[in-house]
Image (tube, rainbow, N blue to C red):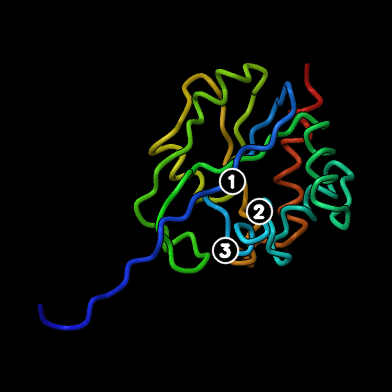
Amino acid sequence: MTGPLRQLPDISRGLLPITGPEPRILILGSFPSVLSLAHREYYGNPRNRFWAVMEEIFDVPAALPYSERTRRLTEEKVALWDVVRECTREGSADSRIRNPLPNDIAGFIQAHPSVRLVALNGSTASRFYHRFAEVPDIPSVTLPSTSPANASVTFGEKVKAWDIIRISCIGE
């Protein structure tokens, strides 16, 4: 063998879904950041604007403890998960995701037939969803990523785009 061996990144496994009994909206991210995995919390990077957007849309204060924020979000009939179940990745950038294996989104929706909309948090989640896990007959919408890497979209623009999930929860 010539040259040093390059160590491959370990396989990272994502988080379990967070849901109430009858979610109407399933929000799918791509895969949790390193900070989110370390904290075992969706959108655990304090620079990610997800919880600030949820505060604007559903009046779920971002300063609440994580367990309270997720409980209140599920009361709004919103579920959280990611498209990717496991992958290799160095760092937190979506562009570094390698060997993605998808979550069973179709199985989740079969177990939760109340889901009316899949909301995809950013273009990478959208690309992986449509490539690996799209569920026929369930509408999906790609929303601007709440990631700190998506600085080209203002917070106000994100809130305005994401308001579709609040509107979708009101229906029925």
**Gap between marks 3 and 2 measured at Cα:** 10 Å
Q: Are marks 1 and 3 in contact (CB under 8 Å)?
A: no
> Which dot marks residue 15?
1
The residue tagged 3 is 34
Which of the two labelled residues, at mark 2 and mark 1, occupies the earlier sequence position? 1
**Amino acid carrying mark 3 in the image:** Val
Residue ID at (62%, 37%): 17
Residue underneath mark 2: 40
Other-residue count near label 2 (Cα within 10 Å), few / some / many at <14 / 14–19 / ≥20: some
Q: Are the residues tagged 2 and 1 within 8 Å (C-beta)? A: yes
Q: Indicate left or right for 39 with 3 as reference.
A: right
Dot 1 or dot 3: first in sequence order is 1
Residue 166 percent coordinates (x, y): 78, 35
| Foreground label between 3 and 2 | 2
Direction from residue 165 to residue 151 in the image, left or right: left
Q: Residue at x 56, y 50 (%)?
A: 122
Identified by mark 2, the residue type is Arg
